[in-house]
Image (cartoon, rainbow, N blue to C red):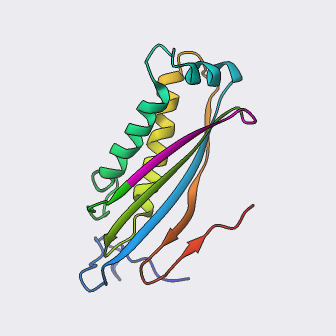
Amino acid sequence: MSSLTHLTSHGEAVMVDVSDKAETERVAIAEARVVMRMETLELALSGNAEKGDVVATARIAGIMAAKKTHELIPLCHPLLLTKVGVDLEPDPSLPGFRVQALAKVKGQTGVEMEALTAVSVACLTLYDMLKAVDRFMRIEGIGLLEKQGGKSGSWKREKE
């Protein structure tokens, strides 16, 4: 196991110096699920939720969150993101939504935290907008699916 790069030899937290790293295209994809009652899923898809268009709002919230990751998570570098996408797919078998976020940058550090932040906030937004009708919703399975670029190359989670 490699050492933690955000800690000095004395255990002090620091922002990693990436100035010597090569600028490469980097991509990360994260996923999560919001599980809810079938009636709640149907309400979200109908567009008649009291708070408005649940899916569109969650998508925009996820994109905005990715852009603010460095303000939310200490020691994250501010990045000039070149793409952020958030997809919310209804899944009656849950029932609920499967949410994926993609973040892309040409830079000196990865975008995993931006993808994870986007997917997390999109799920939290779904929860917030629907909680009045379904207090039993839950957010599950937040995780990184894959990353590309940088010194460590590509990585993809194996299917469970």
Residue 120 coordinates in the image, percent (x, y): 48, 45
Which quadrant is the N terminus positioned in?
bottom right
Residue 84 coordinates in the image, percent (x, y): 39, 53
Q: Quadrant of residue 45?
A: top right
Residue 138 coordinates in the image, percent (x, y): 62, 34
Left/right placement of residue 132 relative to residue 76 reads: right
Left/right placement of residue 45 relative to residue 16 reads: right
Residue at 37% over, 45% down: 63
Left/right placement of residue 20 relative to residue 53 reads: left
Of residue 65 and residue 102, the one placed in the foreground of this image is 102
**Count of residue discs:** 0
Q: Quadrant of residue 51?
A: top left
Residue 80 coordinates in the image, percent (x, y): 26, 62
Q: Is residue 51 above or below residue 156?
A: above
Residue at 58% over, 15% down: 133
Q: Is residue 101 above or below residue 34?
A: below
User: Magenta-highlighted stretch: main secondary structure?
Assistant: strand
Q: Is residue 44 magenta?
A: no
Residue at 57% over, 19% down: 46
Q: Quadrant of residue 134?
A: top right
Residue at 32% over, 60% down: 82
Q: Which residues are magenta?
A: 84-94
Which quadrant is the C terminus positioned in?
bottom right
